[in-house]
Every structure is written in structure tokens, then in C-alpha cells.
Amino acid sequence: MAEPEPGAPPPERRETLRLFFALWPDEVTRDALNRAGKWLHQHWGGRRTRADTLHITLAFLGSTPTGQLDALLACGDAVAAGRFELVLDQAGYWRHNRIGWLGASQTPTQHVELVEALNAALRASDFSVDPRPHVPHVTLLRNSRGGDVPNCEPVRWSVADFVLVRSVTDPEGAHYEVLRRWPLA
Ligand code: ATP
Ligand code: MG
């Protein structure tokens, strides 16, 4: 085996983690989202998201060296934002990736402020931030055919915290580990 470069970080510092910041539902919200997934599946088909993986991505980091984890946790610490209620009342479909999702017809100001605070902290620490506008959504269906947009029963989510999540890809698909949770004021 090749010798490590002089001054190279030890192997564990070179490993990467697939990471993202997210809203993670409490049990009651998760059940409601899971029911919404069953309902949308009846309309649009596809593969339903497993209940224990339902979430809203706030900021996607992707593959991140483990050595940057502390800096990322500090970004979470730097965010000051308030609690809010998110009303998910709109089914949506993206043709390009065949995803069926649940979103909000009205995005609360506090949600926008939370995403902006997070992105500002990430940028200040030189993490790259997705330049596309953020569309809050819960992915409910993959490989779905879509169709007419049915009226849906709104899911009311009292958002009291946000999390940093590790995504691990295994043969059955991605599973997630919540690494840290930050309460909102
Ligand atoms: P899989 O990719 O195995 O089907 P997944 O999409 O749930 O599963 P990841 O690809 O690790 O798992 O993504 C984790 C979260 O980040 C998901 O909510 C996903 O929609 C979002 N995400 C993934 N890639 C990006 C990206 N390039 N930009 C923004 N969000 C992303
Ligand atoms: Mg993915």
C-alpha cells in the first residue's frame, strides 16, 4: 500500500459524509405525512417514501469531509430563528425526476428566514450553497406518473426545531441518521 503523503490528514479525516440540514417531523406530523403519501399514491402511483424518512430538506451539503463536521455544527449553532407553523396543502409533481411531493401554497416568512440564516452561515464558512430558490417540499413518491393535481387535506406541522442529517446509501435505498437537533426560539 502507498505511504500517505507527508502532512496528509489521517484516514478518518479524509472520509466523507453525505449531509443535509432538514426539518424532521414529530410523530404526529409523520403519521399525517404518511397518510398524505398513501392518498397521493392512489392518484399518481410510484414508490412511497418510507414513513421514517419523511422530511423537508433545508440545505443540501452533499459529500462533506468528516473534518468539516465541526464547522458545519457551528453553522447550525449560529442560526437564530423562530418557531412557526407550516401548512402543507399543495400536492406537486416534478416531471424531470418523477417525484410527487407535498408543499405549501404559502411559505411562512419564518421558514424563509430560517433557510436564509442557514445559507448565510454556510456561505460565511465557505460551504457551497444551492443557488436555486428553495421550494419547501416533502417527497412522498418517486418514479411516479403524476397527473391531475388533486385537492388535498392540509398537513399542519408545528416546526420547533431543525436537524443535521447524514444520508447513508445502502442496497435498499437511502437511510438517514439525525446527527444534531437545534431548537427554534
Ligand atoms: P436516493 O438519492 O437514494 O433516492 P434521497 O434522495 O432521499 O435518496 P439523498 O440523495 O441523500 O437521499 O438526499 C437527501 C435529501 O437531500 C433529499 O431530501 C434530497 O431531495 C435532497 N437532495 C439531494 N440532492 C440534492 C441536491 N443536489 N440539491 C438539493 N437537494 C438535494
Ligand atoms: Mg437523492
Image (cartoon, rainbow, N blue to C red):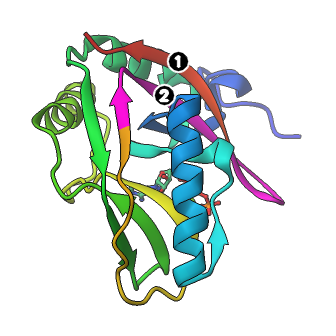
| Residue drawn at point x = 37 percent, y = 65 percent | 152
| Residue drawn at point x = 53 percent, y = 83 percent | 44
Provide the residue designation for mark 2. Answer: 164
Q: Is residue 177 magenta?
A: no
Residue 59 place in picture, x, y as percent:
35, 42
* Number of numbered labels in the structure image: 2
Q: Seen in the image, is 102 located left or right of residue 170?
A: left
| Residue drawn at point x = 67 percent, y = 42 percent | 52
Query: In the rendered structure, are the residues bearing label 2 and label 1 in contact, judged by CB atoms less than 8 Å apart?
Result: yes
Is 43 rendered above or below residue 40?
Answer: below
Mark linked to residue 105: none
The image quadrant of residue 131 is bottom left
Residue 139 place in picture, x, y as percent:
49, 60
Residue 5 place in picture, x, y as percent:
66, 31
Q: Seen in the image, is 84 located left or right of residue 99?
A: left
Quadrant of the image containing the N terminus:
top right
Q: Which residues are magenta?
A: 157-175
Residue 143 visible in the displayed image? no
The majority secondary structure of the magenta stretch comes to strand
The image quadrant of residue 82 is top left
**What is the secondary structure assignment of the residue under circle 1?**
strand
Of callouts 2 and 1, the N-terminal one = 2
Is 67 rendered above or below residue 109?
Answer: above
Residue 92 visible in the displayed image? yes
Q: Seen in the image, is 156 located left or right of residue 97?
A: left
Provide the residue designation for mark 1. Answer: 180
The amino acid type found where label 1 is placed reads Arg
Quadrant of the image containing the C terminus:
top left
The amino acid type found where label 2 is placed reads Leu
Within 10 Å of disc 1 (Cα), the crowding (few <14, some 14-19, many 20+) is few
| Residue drawn at point x = 68 percent, y = 53 percent | 50
Spatial CA distance of label 2 from label 1 is 5 Å
